Amino acid sequence: MPVFPTELTDEIIACIPVVCSGTRERYPTLLCCSLVCSAWLPASRHQLFQELYIDTPVRYDLLVSRVLHSEEMRLYLPSVRTVQLKIPDSPPFNRRPFMLEFAGHLPSVTDMHMSRTALGAWISHPSSFVAISRFSSTQSLMIFRCAFPSFGALRRILTSLPSLTILRLDDPSWPDPAADLSPRLSHGASIVRRPALSVLAASWGSHSPDQRRAQQFMNWLSETATASSLVDLRVSKHPETAQIGCMETFGPSLVRFGRAVRRLDIEVGESRDPKLERFLCSLTSLEALHLRFDSLRLQPDAWVQIASLMHSVPRRTKLLDLYIKFHYSGPPELSNLDGLEALDAALQPELFDDLQAVKLHLFYTEVSTNPQERVRTEPMLAVFKTKLSKLYERSTIEVSADEGYSYTVSVGPQPVVDVEPPTDHNTALS
């Protein structure tokens, strides 16, 4: 029987996480490889331990008893790069002290995901935050719909991770803050050394308690080193209220991040927002701007609103990439493009001379399968050509239909905007 070189089989096994989509495919495949023969076992185990996925009490207890407490298997823990804690809220699982038990045993973890859990029991021990600080290589943290016993608990977690640069928050909660938020901690000076984030993606609801939490968090974060280190800011809100944008949800503290932000992705309300215009005026380093509109219908003055926002960009010559996305219900109508000339006039070549790409994406949630109605695409394209004549002279317009109608206007080659820190572990933001 022929024997393949170990280097070859190790390379094949290393490709399994790349070609298999998701944990449900990756784990069984690697487990099968580990059972082929003893020669395949080390490489298979190494890949299996790249990511810890903990979502049941049984899985956690097996990890502790058969890996953490085993001298032979514990040697694989330094291979772990990603930890996913999808922890049920109910006891007794939420009393298992992951941070305390695994502190110091996962020196190579760069990505940590916490999802749908009440973290009070996990950080109730007096030494919990000291234990968290021992995850010293963690660069990326995602917190998805987790409940904290207090806002202070969230702050202490973020300040305890010395290497944290990428943070994604999706609707975290803690006891409802007071209606009147506490004043700023200082007069514009950053007095808290951590976190020093490069990338922040934050999403909250539009109800009053959610807005107060979002503003309380931004108030505090703007007084940390992040105020001068943040280069990539992505903020969004849940679409309960389409009329308001992110400035209403996150509050005026967003302006304090303006000095270093190079990429901004923000949701815009249906009406003109002077607060957003003032925020754009503070972005003196902006290179990529993504504006998102999510509403029941495309407002007639939307294009004029966008043109006004473009006039607010302080250093227009530095802008490389502009992306505008509309997501709304209903079939496409030519009247949706009324006022499009305002955008063409606002993006003058002499003002935006470095602009390399302009993308317009119109997405309709109601798509007809009737081929006769699809004929509207050509009239739409004709309107784009007519009303974006200046852009069209130096662009190619592509029209595609995928779960809606998509219109893209490209000006020149796609820009490469390197705004994220040099790391291979940014999947939490994708």
Image (tube, rainbow, N blue to C red):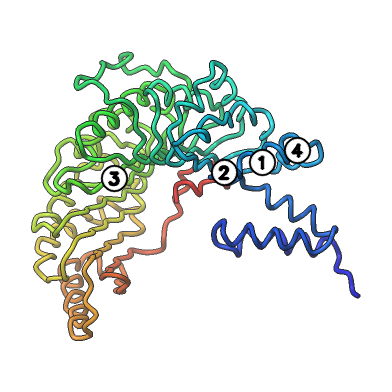
First in sequence: mark 4 or mark 1? 1
Q: Residue at x 37, y 37 (%)?
A: 261
Tell me where residue 54 appears, x and y as whole percent.
57, 43
Type of amino acid at the residue the image marks with label 2: Ile
| N-term-proximal mark, 2 vs 4 | 2
Say which residue label 4 marks.
74
- Tell me the kind of residue under disc 4: Arg
Q: Give whichever of discs 2 and 3 has the lower sequence position.
A: 2
Q: Report the residue marked by disc 3.
A: 266
Find disc 2 in the rendering and name its residue: 54
Contact (Cβ within 8 Å) of mark 3 with mark 4: no
- Identified at 63% across, 43% down, the residue is 81
Near mark 4 (Cα within 10 A), the count class, few <14, some 14-19 or many ≥20, is some
Q: Residues within 10 Å of mark 1 (few under 14, many from 20)?
A: some
Pick whichever of labels 3 and 4 is earlier in the sequence.
4
Count of number-bearing discs: 4
Image vertical order of residue 213 relative to residue 409, above or below: above
Q: Nearer the viewer, mark 3 or mark 1?
A: 1
Q: Residue at x 30, y 67 (%)?
A: 408
Residue at image point 23% right, 72% down:
367
Classify residue 57 by image quadrant.
top right
Q: Which residue is mark 1?
A: 63
Work out whether mark 3 precedes mark 1 in sequence or the reverse, and give the earlier one. 1
Residue at the outermost front position: 92
Mark 3 falls on what kind of element?
Answer: strand
Q: Are marks 2 and 1 in contact (CB under 8 Å)?
A: yes
Local packing at callout 3 (Cα closer than 10 Å; few below 14, some 14-19, many 20+) is many
